[in-house]
């Protein structure tokens, strides 16, 4: 009886809105996992609801954190003593062009916005990748110690250096992969497979962690079957 009472009323002091919220979250979680049996209307309803709520949430975040402080306020309600930032009309116009995709006759204008966004992100990510990955990888490779840290550490550091060089040789297509170059390229393939396997394993671990989190929510927070 206590378990049933706690299931429908929650722990002492829990507001009714929190209990109903837990029930909705629990039922929607079961609806999502019903896809493990097969595709069904309940799963599609939960999926559509999740996408719609997520889109509405990010739209609200975008409005309050970006449009209002960085566009509307500087243009129409600048703080006293500060000039109107007219140059922000340009990104505002590009943002308005994105909404024209809903109007077939004017949807071509949205390509200008998409082209600007793709080009800007390509430039920003290229710089970020060069500084965050390429330069860091080169620096870590050329500064890897081979004379200290013990035999195992030295062996692992040497393997890392050989792996980087062999992988780069695999992507070097200006010379035919034969002889020593071909052997190094094949070694680079093995290192790539190890890296892909580790990345896949990391992804699987992340999904398993999500599953454990949802099972904990169902059994502890919703059904109160575990502490």
Image: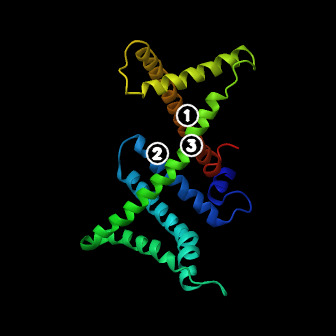
Q: Secondary structure at mark 1?
A: helix
Q: Secondary structure at mark 3?
A: helix
Q: Is residue 215 visible in the rendered structure shown here?
A: no
- Where is mark 1, residue-wise? 202
How far apart, in angstroms, are the residues tagged by discs 2 and 3? Answer: 12 Å
Label located before the other in sequence (2 or 3):
2
The quadrant in which the C terminus is found is top right
Identify the residue at image location x=56%, y=43%.
Answer: 210
Q: Badges 2 and 3: C-beta atoms under 8 Å apart?
A: no
* Residue 209, quarter of picture: top right
Identify the residue at image location x=51%, y=64%.
Answer: 58
Q: List the single residue furthest toward the front.
A: 174
Q: Secondary structure at mark 2?
A: helix
- Where is mark 3, residue-wise? 210
Q: Is residue 136 visible in the rendered structure shown here?
A: yes
* Residue 49, quarter of picture: bottom left
Instruction: Count residues near mark 3 (Cα–Cα under 10 Å), then give few for <14, some for 14-19, many for 20+.
Output: few
| Residue 112, x across and y down, in percent | 35, 66
Q: Which mark is residue 33?
A: 2
Label located before the other in sequence (3 or 1):
1
| Residue 6, x across and y down, in percent | 67, 55
Residue 204, above or below 5: above
Q: List the single residue furthest toward the left.
A: 105
């Amino acid at each position: 009886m206590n378990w049933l009472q706690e299931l429908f009323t929650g722990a002492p002091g829990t507001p009714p809105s929190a209990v109903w919220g837990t029930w909705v979250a629990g039922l929607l979680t079961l609806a999502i996992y019903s896809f493990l049996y097969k595709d069904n209307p309940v799963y599609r309803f939960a999926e559509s609801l999740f996408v719609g709520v997520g889109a509405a949430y990010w739209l609200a975040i975008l409005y309050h954190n970006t449009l209002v402080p960085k566009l509307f306020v500087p243009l129409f309600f600048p703080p006293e003593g500060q000039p109107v930032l007219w140059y922000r009309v340009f990104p505002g116009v590009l943002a308005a062009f994105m909404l024209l995709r809903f109007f077939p006759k004017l949807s071509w204008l949205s390509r200008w916005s998409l082209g600007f966004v793709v080009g800007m992100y390509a430039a920003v990510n290229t710089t970020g990748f060069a500084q965050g990955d390429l330069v860091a990888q080169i620096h870590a490779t050329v500064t890897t110690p081979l004379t200290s840290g013990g035999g195992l550490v030295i062996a692992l550091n040497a393997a890392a250096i050989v792996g980087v060089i062999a992988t780069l040789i695999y992507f070097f297509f200006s010379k035919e992969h034969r002889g020593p170059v071909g052997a190094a390229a094949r070694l680079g393939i093995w290192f790539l497979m190890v890296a892909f396997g580790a990345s896949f394993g990391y992804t699987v671990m992340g999904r398993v962690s999500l599953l454990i989190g949802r099972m904990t929510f169902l059994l502890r927070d919703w059904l109160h079957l575990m502490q």
